[in-house]
Every structure is written in C-alpha cells, then in structure tokens.
Amino acid sequence: MAPARFQPSSIKNKIKREEVSRKLKKSKSQAKLQKRLDQAKVEANDPAAKKKRISENVPRTLDNAREADPAMLSAAGPSSTQHAEFSNDIASDPFADYFNFTQDPTIPPKVLITTSAKASKGTYEFCDELVGVFPGAEFIRRKKGKGFEMGRIAGWAAGRGYKHLLVVNEDMKKPNAITLVYLPNGPMAYFKLTSIELTKQIYGHARATPHNPELVLNNFSTTLGHGVGRMFQTLFPPLPEFQGRQVVALHNQRDFLFFRRHRYAFRSPEKVALQEIGPRFTLKLRWLKRGLPAVQNFGASPDALEISVGTEELPEPLEEAPMPEQDEESEMKPPEPLPASNPPKDNEYIWRWKPELETTRRTFFL
C-alpha cells in the first residue's frame, strides 16, 4: 500500500510520474481557489476583516526593508536630540537665506546654465529644456580656451547676482552628468544623468506656460537627502503661481532621483488628471563638495626672476595715502556689481559615493 504522502519524483515510470504530478498540481490550485472564495464570502459580510488582511499583507521590498541608517529621520518624527541637531543644521546650512524669505518670494532665483567644452547638438537641446523648467534660468554658451574653467565661471556668475550654476556634461555626444553649484559660496553636487526624454519625445505632452511651478520632493528621509532636496528647492521661487497648474516632482527611490513635470487637467469638478509636460530624466548623486569648483591653474604668468647683487636693502616704508573726501556726487553714484569670488585650489568632500559603501542591496543614502 502506497504511503499517504510521497513525492512524484520517487515514481520511476515517466508516464505515471507526470500523471501524478499533474493531478497533485491541479488539486493544490483548486484548494487555493476554494480558500480565496471562502475568504471573499467572509469579507463580504465583514469589511473590517478585509481591511485587516490588506494592512497585514504588506509585500517585502527593497524600499521598506532598507538597512537602518543613523542619519535617517523616522516617519513618526525625530527624537528630541535628533530634532535639535537637525534644526541647528538647517539654521546654519548655506540655504538658510532662501528659507528666511528676505527677498520677494515671487522673483525666481537666477540660474546660469552652460555646458562642458565642445558640446554637441543633443546637449544644447537638453539645455533648452532646462531653461524652460527653471523660471529664472539663462543659457550662455561656454567658450573654448583657458580662463573658462568651471571655478572661474562660478566666480563670475556669483559677482553678477546668479544663485546657481548648472553645468551639463556630455560623453559620446550625449548628456551624461550635471554639476549643480550653489552661489556664491557653495556647496556643489555632481549627478549622473540617464534616461533622458525630451518634450517632443513624449506622446501627448502638454505645453508649458511661463508660470512658476509647484515643487514636490518625495522620499528624502536622511540628513543628506534633506540637504539635496533643499538644494533643488532653491532653484524655484518660494511662492508658486497656482493658476498655471504646473507641478515639478522629484521622486527619490533607491537613491535614484526621477524628475517629472506635469500639469493638472480638471476633467470635472470631482475628477482631476495629470498631463505630462516634459522633459523627464533620472539623476544619481555621486559626490557633494564644499565651496566653489577648484581651479589649479588660474592662467597667470609666473613671477619674474629677481637676482639681488650686493648687500640687501631694506624695504622703504610705505606712505599712507590720504583718504579722499566724499562729495555729494560720489555719494549718489549707483552701487557697483558684486565682486567675483576667487575659486579655491582644492575642495573638501562632504559625501562621496564609493562601491564599498553599498554593503547590501538594501543600503541607501538619501
């Protein structure tokens, strides 16, 4: 007599083994279906049972199973010590002036957009899209030759009232990275750029208007993520123009930043839909540095060679120049432009991605 439970693989006859395996699989599927039907009957009479099952049946993903990070802010709210440290960091970070609303919130910050040297047509098309995304953006073609290093351009832009410098880098005639510099004193961030789709490549896209859009930052849960989110927030004016019905979303998922731009489409008083405007692209943070971009060689000629012969001569004392008298005409002159800040010769990393940091697939930093 055969045992009550056995494995079909123990049957040596192939035809009989396939038949038993097929019957066993069918019986399991029928039992599973019957269990689902019985459960549906119970939940039809008791809606609370269905809510309980849905709340308990949460799939395990890489997002909700991420490793604990000391810099991560919990959803329930940070602790008192963590909240005090986080508040001090926010009050002393470089973006504090933007959130103090000392300027007109309807005026968009000035953003200078340029490219790497010898850019191609695809990079210029992407820069045109970025000019339409940021309300205060302006594109200037980057010249060739010495004297146009990124640090010099950042100092030049800071002296003319720009708040950001955005440089689009390319490789193989395609945009592959973005360097975002906050002016006048930094910091700066470097992002890898992938999955670019221009507005004309999106089927059924909407047309953009010159209104200031809303900004949605999603899933930035660490102190580093909050810093990156605040840096992107300073690219837009604090007060959006809601009549434009435009919204820009930057969604963080597994440290990939997905950029999307939509418009609200009100189908009826009860229903609303989203119509994508474009462009769409994906960013991945690679490093974050303090200050402006470093420039090793400023292009200045070396000092002339001096040869001293004989005895050393003492330097003559410098005569103090008399202070010029200020008349009424000099007091009425308009203020001069801000002085351009000199770029440093070296930069300090605030954070830098390394392969050894990702110990598991569940390790995220933003």
Image (spheres, rainbow, N blue to C red):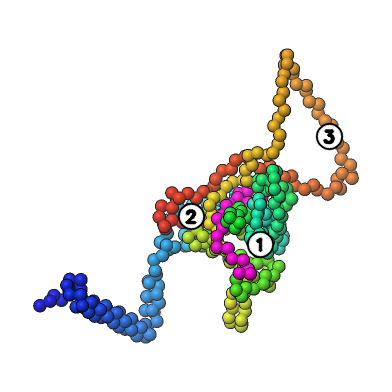
Residue 288 at x, y = what percent? 56, 50
Report the span colored magenta.
181-201
**Hey, which quadrant is residue 340 in on the image?**
top right
User: For mark 3, what is the residue?
Assistant: 323
Identify the mark nearer the N-term, 2 or 1.
1
* Label whose residue precedes the other's in the sequence (3 or 2): 3
Q: Secondary structure at mark 2?
A: loop
The amino acid at mark 3 is Met
Q: Residue at 67% across / 70% down in the picture? A: 208
Let me know if residue 236 is in the magenta part.
no
* In this picture, residue 229 sits left or right of residue 243: left
> Which type of secondary structure does the marked residue at label 3 adopt?
loop
Residue at (17, 75) in percent of width and height? 13
Amino acid at pointer 1 = Glu
Q: Residue at x 73, y 16 (%)?
A: 309
Circle 2: residue type: Phe
* Residue depicted at 20% across the width and 71% down the height: 9
The answer to whether one can see residue 99 in this image is no
Residue 65 sits above or below residue 296 on the image: below
Q: Say if 125 sits above or below 296 in the image.
A: below
> The N terminus lies in which quarter of the figure?
bottom left
Q: Nearer the viewer, residue 274 or 26?
A: 26
Residues at marks 2 and 1, CA–CA distance in whole angstroms: 32 Å
Left or right: residue 170 versus residue 26 is: right
Position of 190 with respect to 56 (left or right) is right
Q: Which mark is residue 223?
A: none
Indicate which disc, 1 or 3, sits on the residue closer to the N terminus: 1
Q: Select label 2 or label 1 by which is in front.
A: 1
Give the percent coordinates (x, y) of residue 277.
63, 70
Secondary structure beneath dot 1 equals helix
Circle 2 residue = 365
